[in-house]
Image (cartoon, helix red, strand yellow):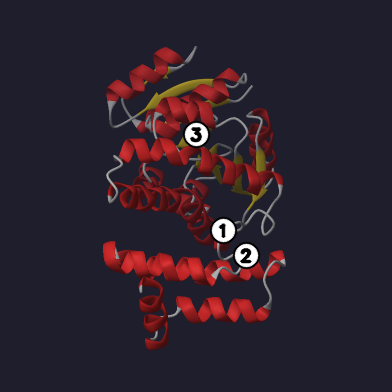
């Protein structure tokens, strides 16, 4: 059985090490800038020892995960003396395996294994990893090893090329990070009618979960609901009017999201081309639209 090592005992490294250990992989060594984190991980994983430097991990393991912050990966790769035949894998979503070139030059195989998941805390990361999709970048035979590891974690895998990584990661930011931003904007609006942020978040959670369930079960575009999906220009105008009065800074965001939603509504088939053009006209800033908005408030 291959011996795994982890350089970096932060949220991703700790959660991944614990999960692969649970699936029968041997984690031999871990190092971290924070020695306490390394010791804590070593205590949690049977057979693992915390070592004082990254080289000790490379010397103890056949397969080394670099789970440091993205900005430190290339430095780690260049400072360690890798061994021929060793596997060196980073977990960055945005970087290709090219940043592991020093390992390749030493005769090691280089790869990337990115869990498409959000890691707000170690506990949440441990809970969320199983069933995730893993973005893989590697050549054989390492690629097969990474596929097997993803499967062992009850996950799916996709294979990416180096040129795909940045857009792949951008898509993840849209789907995860900016979802948080949208919920924050929604709760800010609730505070304008005196509902505290935490209460607003709790109230919105069933809506969010229902939306995600619809995306999963029905798919896009059929899951789309709301005023744009039904061509309700009157409601859109009311929204614009309300935002202009209370939160004018959100107008441009609302307009752009609305414009991006119109093609989805068209694809769903519940609005026609004329309705789509009317919605576009309303959502694009113009004097005519301003007059329409004022008309709604009269």
The residue sitting at 65% across, 46% down in the picture is 214
Circle 1 SS class: loop
Give the x, y percent position of residue 286.
39, 85
Residues at circles 2 and 3 in contact by the CB criterion of under 8 Å: no
* Residue in the foreground of this view, choosing between 179 and 156: 179
Which tag, 1 or 3, sits closer to the chain's start? 3
Tell me if 84 is positioned left or right of 12 in this view. right
In the rendered image, residue 261, in percent from the top left (x then y), is placed at: 56, 66
Taking the image as shown, residue 6 lies to the left or right of residue 187, namely right
Residues at marks 1 and 3, CA–CA distance in whole angstroms: 48 Å
Q: Position of residue 241 (x, y in %)?
A: 36, 69
Compare residues 85 and 257 and report the one nearer the observer: 257
State the residue at coordinates (56%, 80%). Answer: 278
Q: What distance separates the C-alpha of mark 1 from that of mark 2?
A: 7 Å
Residue 87 makes an appearance in the image? yes
Q: Compute the Cα span from label 2 to label 3.
A: 53 Å
14 or 31, nearer to the observer: 14
Mark carried by residue 230: 2
Relative to 28, say whether 231 is above or below. Answer: below
Badge 3 crowding class, 10 Å Cα cut-off, few under 14, some 14 to 19, many 20 or more, is many
**Quick one: label 2 or label 3, which is nearer the N terminus?**
3
Q: Is residue 111 left or right of residue 199?
A: right
Q: Which residue is at the far front? A: 298
Q: Residue at x 39, y 66 (%)?
A: 253
Q: Is residue 61 visible to the viewer in this orientation of the structure?
A: no
Q: Identify which residue is drawn at 44% across, 22% down.
A: 29
CB atoms of marks 1 and 2 within 8 Å: yes
Determine the secondary structure under disc 3. strand
Q: Where does label 3 land, which residue?
A: 64
Give the quarter of the image for residue 160: bottom right
| Tag 1 residue | 226
């Amino acid at each position: 059985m291959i011996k795994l090592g982890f350089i970096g005992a932060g949220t991703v490294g700790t959660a991944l090490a614990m999960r692969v250990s649970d699936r029968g992989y041997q984690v031999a060594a871990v190092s971290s800038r924070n020695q306490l984190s390394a010791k804590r991980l070593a205590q949690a994983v049977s057979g693992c020892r915390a070592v004082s430097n990254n080289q000790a991990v490379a010397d103890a393991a056949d397969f080394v995960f670099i789970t440091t912050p993205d900005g430190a990966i290339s430095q780690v790769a260049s400072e360690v003396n890798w061994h021929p035949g060793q596997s060196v894998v980073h977990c960055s979503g945005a970087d290709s395996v090219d940043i592991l070139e020093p390992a390749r030059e030493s005769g090691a195989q280089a790869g990337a294994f990115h869990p498409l998941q959000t890691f707000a805390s170690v506990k949440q990361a441990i809970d969320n990893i199983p069933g995730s999709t893993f973005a893989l970048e590697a050549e054989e035979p390492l690629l097969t090893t990474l596929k097997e590891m993803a499967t062992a974690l009850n996950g799916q895998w996709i294979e990416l090329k180096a040129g795909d990584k940045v857009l792949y990661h951008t898509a993840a930011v849209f789907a995860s990070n900016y979802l948080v931003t949208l919920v924050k904007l929604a709760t800010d609006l609730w505070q304008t009618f005196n509902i505290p942020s935490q209460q607003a978040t709790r109230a919105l959670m069933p809506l969010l979960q229902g939306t995600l369930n619809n995306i999963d079960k029905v798919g896009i575009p059929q899951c789309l609901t709301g005023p744009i999906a039904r061509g309700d220009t009157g409601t859109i105008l009311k929204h614009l009017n309300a935002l202009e009065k209370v939160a004018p800074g959100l107008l441009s965001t609302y307009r752009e999201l609305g414009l991006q939603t119109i093609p989805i509504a068209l694809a769903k088939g519940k609005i026609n081309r004329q309705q789509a053009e009317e919605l576009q006209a309303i959502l694009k800033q113009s004097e005519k639209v301003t007059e329409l908005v004022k008309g709604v408030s009269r």
